[in-house]
Amino acid sequence: MSPASYETATNDAERGAGIVLASLGYRTFVAGRLYVSSELEAAFHGGGPAGYLREGTGVGDRDVWPGPWSVGKEGGADMNARLGYAPGGLLGEGGSVYLVAGMHWERATVRRGSDINGRSIRIAVEHTLRPRVVGADAEWGSLASRIGLGVRHSAAELEFRTGGDGSALGMPRIDHRFRVREVGVQVSYTRSF
């Protein structure tokens, strides 16, 4: 019996994803102009990252099988916490700078293909991604409404298995492990109630 086959390679995504977020949160000042807040978000995704793995340089069944991959995000829910400072001045009466950290739950379809000896094999698997998110943002405007600009970094891991029993005569068993890291710019509009 041969060991389980596995693929290992890295490459950068060829496309990004558009996201629309609807948030509901609460902010409270804890000391002077320092505040904490929490927020719940509903995320509506359009697309996701994609790429093509090239053939690996491993030994035997440990070679990377070349082929396309994509992670199509469908939607999700987010929970974030903020630590911020509202300096006033140039940022306006309601403006602030803050750090954000959170956990997200995203439904995604992972597509993985292998191009082996002139044959194309394609699989699609539904998964829930659980990326951790960190970022920094700034908001300008009044207490009632603000415009924001921020940078977010997220990272998630995903593992699944496809194929057969992994024996030398049978279909290979393929363990897939994706590490999805994304950096994004977020433009926001906040309305206070």
Image (spheres, rainbow, N blue to C red):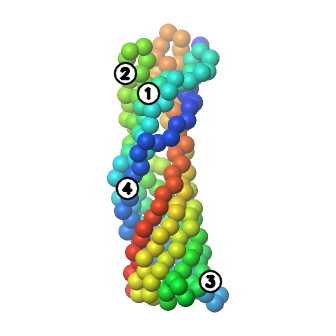
Residue displayed at 45% across by 48% down: 128
Q: Which residue is mark 2?
A: 120
Residue displayed at 59% across by 85% down: 87
Q: Is residue 76 visible?
A: yes
Q: Is residue 192 visible?
A: no
> In the rendered structure, are the residues bearing label 2 and label 1 in contact, judged by CB atoms less than 8 Å apart?
yes
Relative side of 133 to 113, left or right: right
Q: Which residue is mark 3?
A: 34
On the rendered image, what quadrant is the N terminus found in? top right
Q: Which residue is mark 4?
A: 18
**What type is the residue that disc 3 sits on?**
Leu
Relative side of 87 to 74, left or right: right
**What type is the residue that disc 4 sits on?**
Gly
If you read the primary sequence from the N terminus, does the residue marked by circle 1 or circle 4 appear first?
A: 4
If you read the primary sequence from the N terminus, does the residue marked by circle 4 or circle 2 appear first?
A: 4
Which residue reaches farthest right? 31
